[in-house]
C-alpha cells in the first residue's frame, strides 16, 4: 500500500528540489525544511519503504556510498565532484560501447561514473590549486560536458 505521509512528501520534495542523487544525510538536511521534526531514523525507514514501493531508486557509488534518486529518469550517467562530494546526473551518452565489446559479447546495460570538479567548486580559488596539482600528477583530464543540449537515451 502506497502511503503518502508528511515525512515521505518531504523526502520526495527534497529530491525534486535538488534534482540529483542524494545521500541520506543530504535528504535529511533538505527534507527538514519541509518537516522540521524529521529525524535520521525516519529518513532511513521512509527511504526503505519508498524503494520497496518503486518511488525511489538506489545508486551504488564506488567505495560503498549509496545515493537515492527518483525513478523514471531516462538512461543517464553520473558525475562525482571530488571537492564537494555531490553527484550530478549526466544525460549524454556519447559512447558506442558495442564497438569495443569482444566478438560474441552482448551488452545489456552499463553505468559510467565521471569524476572531477563541478562548476560551482571549479569557480572557487581553493579548487583552482587542487585542479593544478591534480593535472600535474596526471590524476584528471579536463572534460567539458554540455548538459544543456543533451538528449536522454
Image (cartoon, helix red, strand yellow):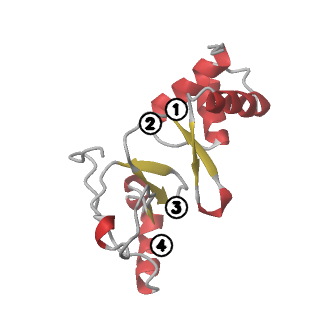
Q: CA distance from mark 3 to mark 1?
A: 21 Å
Query: Which residue matches tag 2?
Result: 19
Residue count near mark 1 (Cα–Cα under 10 Å), binned few <14, some 14–19, many ≥20: many
Q: CA distance from mark 4 to mark 1?
A: 30 Å
Query: Which residue matches tag 4?
Result: 130
Residue 27 in the image: above or below residue 62: above
Q: CA distance from mark 3 to mark 2?
A: 19 Å
**What element does badge 1 sit on?**
helix
Q: CA distance from mark 4 to mark 2?
A: 27 Å
Report the mark closest to the observer, 4 or 2.
2
First reached walking from the N terminus: tag 4 or tag 1: 1
Label 1 close to label 2 by CB (< 8 Å): yes
Residue count near mark 3 (Cα–Cα under 10 Å), binned few <14, some 14–19, many ≥20: some
First reached walking from the N terminus: tag 3 or tag 1: 1
Q: Residue furthest front?
A: 104
Q: Residue at x 42, y 85 (%)?
A: 136
Label 4 close to label 3 by CB (< 8 Å): yes
**What element does badge 4 sit on?**
helix
Q: Residue furthest right?
A: 41
x, y (%) of residue 92?
Answer: 30, 52
Query: Which residue matches tag 3?
Result: 83
First reached walking from the N terminus: tag 4 or tag 2: 2
Residue 63 in the image: above or below residue 120: below
Query: Which residue matches tag 1?
Result: 15
Amino acid at each position: 500500500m502506497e502511503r503518502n505521509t508528511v515525512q515521505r512528501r518531504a523526502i520526495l520534495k527534497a529530491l525534486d528540489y535538488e534534482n540529483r542523487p542524494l545521500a541520506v544525510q543530504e535528504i535529511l538536511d533538505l527534507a527538514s525544511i519541509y518537516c522540521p521534526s524529521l529525524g535520521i531514523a525516519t529518513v532511513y525507514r521512509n527511504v526503505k519503504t519508498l524503494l520497496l514501493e518503486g518511488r525511489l531508486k538506489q545508486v551504488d557509488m564506488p567505495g560503498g556510498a549509496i545515493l537515492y534518486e527518483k525513478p523514471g529518469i531516462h538512461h543517464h550517467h553520473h558525475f562525482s565532484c571530488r571537492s564537494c562530494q555531490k553527484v550530478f546526473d549526466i544525460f549524454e551518452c556519447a559512447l558506442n560501447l558495442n564497438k569495443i565489446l569482444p566478438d560474441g559479447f552482448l551488452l545489456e546495460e552499463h553505468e559510467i561514473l565521471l569524476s572531477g570538479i563541478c562548476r560551482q567548486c571549479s569557480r572557487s580559488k581553493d579548487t583552482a590549486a587542487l585542479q593544478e596539482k591534480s593535472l600535474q600528477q596526471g590524476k584528471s583530464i579536463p572534460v567539458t560536458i554540455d548538459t544543456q543540449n543533451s538528449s536522454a537515451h
